[in-house]
Amino acid sequence: MSLRKGRSITDIFGLHVFNEQAMKKHLPYKAYLRLAEIVRAGGRIDEPLAEEVAHGVKEWAIANGATHYCHWFQPMTGATAEKHDSLLSYDAKGQPISRFSGKHLIQGEPDASSFPSGGIRATFEARGYTAWDPTSPIFLAESGGGATVCIPTIFLSYTGEALDEKAPLLRSMAAVGAAGLRVLRLFGAAAATRVYPTVGAEQEYFLVDRARFDRRPDLVL
């Protein structure tokens, strides 16, 4: 679905994101509740849930004109990377069908030999694995008249080392959360179940006049 001119920002905001509204519409209610709880508090996505989510994502994506999907990750190159596959497949009789399974959603296997790893790896360890991060919403990227389903993932080596920027972030957030809960317990906050860091608009910032900014080499740098 292309974003047409003349539509208000409130009409198109989040239109190409598999957000809570889209999940409620395209997932069975119990599957939506389970996925929402995993996103909120953590947990394991089992195969039946992965299949239900994959089916809902496929229906939503096709309704919005998507023809392909990719595992979207941030390798240590300062850019993003994707491994693309088609939603088009064939049945036993050779007839074209749209297919997107829970396995396709959960994990991918791009070649890791092209990306920096910070060390030397044996040839048989050159492959990497992408794994879906459900805490980041799936979205559509339009290009050339079509659309691709972008599945946010982490990128790990054959031996489990992080090959991207996101896996270390998630691991550090988990460590901060665990330490934060221990501190809260010391202060008697027994009801707390999760601590997570945030960064963004709530952080302080400084508005400096342009002329004064230009006279501050430390700011210009």
Image (cartoon, rainbow, N blue to C red):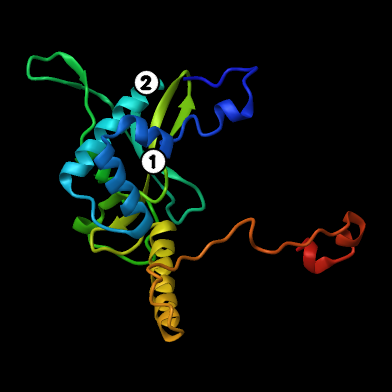
73 up-or-down from 25: above or below = below
Front label number (2 vs 1): 2
| Mark 2 / mark 1, whichever is N-terminal | 2
Mark identifier at residue 128: none
Q: Residue at x 51, y 53 (%)?
A: 78
Q: Percent x, y for residue 142?
A: 48, 26
The single residue placed furthest to the left in the displayed view is: 92
Residue 125 visible in the picture: yes
Residue 84, image x and y in percent?
33, 34
Please, what secondary structure does the residue beneath circle 1 have? Answer: strand
Look at 40% across and 20% down and name the residue there. 65
Look at label 1 and name its amino acid. Answer: Glu
Mark 2 highlights which residue? 63
Q: Position of residue 161 (x, y in %)?
A: 31, 64
**Amino acid type indicated by mark 2:** Ala
Mark 1 neighbour density, 10 Å: few (under 14) some (14–19) many (20 or more): some
Q: Could you tell me residue 184's position as x and y percent?
A: 44, 79
Q: Residues within 10 Å of mark 2 (few under 14, many from 20)?
A: few
Residue located beneath label 1 in the image: 82
Q: Residue at x 36, y 36 (%)?
A: 23
**As displayed, is residue 195 above or below residue 139?**
below
Name the residue nearer the viewer: 77 or 122: 77
Query: Which of the image's four quarters has the C terminus?
Result: bottom right
Residue 19 lies in what quarter of the image? Answer: top left
Per the model, the C-alpha gap separating discs 2 and 1 is 22 Å
Query: Splitting the image into 4 quarters, where does residue 71 fall?
Result: top left
Q: How many numbered dots are placed on residues in this image?
A: 2
Between 196 and 159, which is closer to the camera in this rendering? 196
